[in-house]
Amino acid sequence: MFEALTDRLTEVFQRIGRKGRLTEQDVDEALREVRRALLEADVHYTVVRDFIAAVRERAVGEEVLRSLTPAQQVIAIVHQELVRVLGTERVPLQWASQPPTVFLLVGLQGSGKTTQVAKLGYHLRKEGRRPLLVAADIYRPAAVEQLHTLGRQHDLPVYDEGTKANPVDIVKRAVKLARDQGYNPVIVDTAGRLQIDEPMMEELERIKEAVRPTEILLVADAMTGQEAVNVAREFHRRLDLTGLILTKMDGDARGGAALSIRTVVGVPIKFIGTGERVDALEPFYPDRLATRILGMGDIQSLIEKARQEISEEEGKKLQEKMLAGAFDLEDFLRQLQQVKKMGPLTQLLEMIPGMSQLLRQQQVQISDDEYKRVEAIILSMTPEERRNPDIINYSRRRRIAQGSGTTVAEVSQLLTQFKQMQRMMAELGQLAGGRGRGALHGLLGGRNPFGGLTGLDGMPSLGGLPTRPTQAPHPARHTKKKKKRR
Amino acid sequence: MIFSRFFRRRTPPTPQLESGLRRSRQGIFRQIVQLFERNQVDEELFEDLEALLIQADLGVTTTEALLERLRERVRRGEVRDPVEAREALRDEMVALLESAMRNRRVKIYQRGVPFVSLVVGVNGTGKTTTIAKLARYHLDQGRSVLLVAADTFRAAAIDQLKTWGEQLGIPVIAHAPGADPGAVVFDGMQAAHNRGIDVLLIDTAGRLHTKSNLMAELAKIRRVIQRHVPEAPHEVLLVIDATTGQNGLNQARVFTEAAGVTDIALTKLDGTAKGGIAFAIARELGIPIAYVGTGEKPTDFAEFDPETYVDALFFGDEED
């Protein structure tokens, strides 16, 4: 998608064929493409209109920097403006001066409130708090049971009064209990409701009146379309929201709804939900979301994850081995395991700009089971075989296949592809020797520990997936491909 | 009112859909009225129509395609004033949905062979509630129904389905939380056979379409079903929430690849969201909408009819 936007912008500017200052005409043509990208990301129609007007004002007449093309220049301005609207600073949760602090989570049906309540509780307990979760959704069948189950699984106390009591009373008594027994904060799970459901919205107002929550957080699904604006505006009008939790960001939705909500109600985005697991709650980074809304992938997050899991030193050692052509299956296995620590493969790949698009176009199914299969095959080899794959003859292959629950063909495929990868690396190594190390560093992602990322490139094909041509590409071509990051 | 004659109803009302959609149409209705109060078909009218359709989540591409067809009709002289433009746009929208409806498989219910309906979708679109509604719908048609709780992942999902089962008086096949969904479905298929059940409704866990392992699980469930009844599942319902934006298209695409989606169930139409992504799905993938959900009660449910939907959502009627 980013490629699409950049390409389209580049095309626009080529057609105009000028440099120097951005003229009104340049900007208008470019912004038409930007507008489309934003609408495709589900940013609300009127929000897009105002946003484009603001960018236009900034961009017209601006000098095109020598280092940038006009297309890049426009994208840079758009990106900066997006970040500005999304909020340049992270705003932490606010706490009441008098404990317990009450957090109220509200939103439409199915936005993920109950799951986020558990995540928030888990997150805050890790920070040394003693949270109490409150089940105030008495309407949806088994909602109370759901919160209880989550509480039990993660050892978080849950307060409930079944489904017969009034939610306002439930919350009041929960807060009293928290005060008496030293729980702090109190995190309230409310029933999902439509913003136009008068009795249900009144119920929230009464809960707010009764316990004066410090934070009232709107839980919104990243996949929400144009409706996000109506929902947020109405919840805000009734309750004075203090923040937003954007859920289901582990999918491939671009999350334009967040920009709409930010623009309309102005409250900060406090957390991002990135999965169903209780630890899948992350702080919010505006620049990353801006990149994502424009469809530019999330390479920063990926690099950060790689940094967390792979030490600089390890990365360097691996790199040297690779370039010397001495990279063996044991190194590969270690690398595989490191990548695995970083999270599900699909999630990692989605972070690479354009990757999700590409994978879908080529109809490639990448499954984390591929990890397991490749891992099983390598683990079924003797250390000797891993260090020196050339000795693996047919009889050894059969044994490995049996040991790993795969077929001889799968083992052979892995070996063939590994050999190709090894050769490619050696060629790259020679290239690096010729042109100096610095160039190669830049090429492979700069300072970023190189094991992880290369692993990502090599992995899918090693799993027997048709993600790259069967013969090893020419190193020069490979270089070009890498730089473009398609 | 002056505009009432423009908004002559063309199709008989469906009570559930009507009441549910009434709220959806507030606001947008006023807009469309103003739109056609203009005296001529000009660029401004097209701009306003674009705003209207995009705000209904039809997406840029589908909106442009619809408006291009309208422009074409203006060029050909078939459309001369805003009233005709309204009629023409309405017809184009209905035609778009109807062309997908032609892909519908006829639903044949026969004694002795359970009609298997597999209900899938991303998290929080209302799969379990839709199952309750479907169950109620089939009961009303005099069919025996069995529910299968194949969402063994989300906390208390099984309890949720069981609660519905009790309320509707129908049996639920369930295993313990965390069990293999394939195994539950296997038992469900067997039970349906043994008890001579007419309709088997399978509730699956919500899953984002980007999780390929979970999508593979759906393919496996399909295989388990087919081992019992080769032509099943007779219906694979993708539940899409009316508030869903452009991501709905990706959802439909990937779920279709993995699970062979046959129809869409469009839920939560009782809010102000319009579910316009269904147009994009119908246009790009040709998947028809079968049912609409308009509330939390099992009766808030209707079979989908393109004309009623388009009229109710975009073109209102006199009572407003």
Image: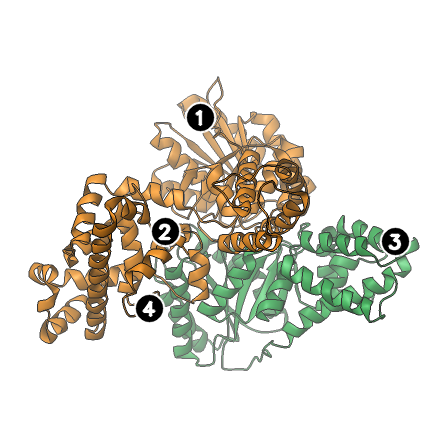
Chain colours: A orange, B green
Q: Secondary structure at mark 4?
A: loop
User: Could you tell me which chain the residue with mark 3 belongs to?
Assistant: B
Q: What's the CA distance linking mark 2 and mark 3?
A: 52 Å
Q: Earlier in the sequence, mark 1 or mark 2?
A: 1
**Mark before the other along the chain sequence, 1 or 4:** 1
Residue at image mark 2: A348
The tag on residue B123 is none
Give me the C-alpha separation between circle 3 and circle 4: 59 Å
Outermost residue to the top: A97
- The secondary element bearing badge 2 is classed as helix
Amino acid at circle 3: Glu
The reply, left or right, for residue B98 in relation to residue A73 is: right
Does the rendering let one see residue A162?
yes
> Disc 2 sits on a residue from what chain?
A
Q: Which residue bears the numbered disc 3?
A: B37
Residue shown at 63% from the left, 32% from the top: A239
Residue at image location 27% in from the left, 54% down from the top: A455
**Chain for numbered disc 1:** A
Image location of residue A128, percent across then percent down: 34, 27
Q: Nearer the viewer, mark 3 or mark 1?
A: 3
At horizontal 23% and vertical 70% (from top left) the residue drawn is: A413
Cα–Cα gap, marks 3 and 1: 59 Å
Whole-percent x, y for residue B292 in the image: 64, 62
Residue at numbered disc 4: A469
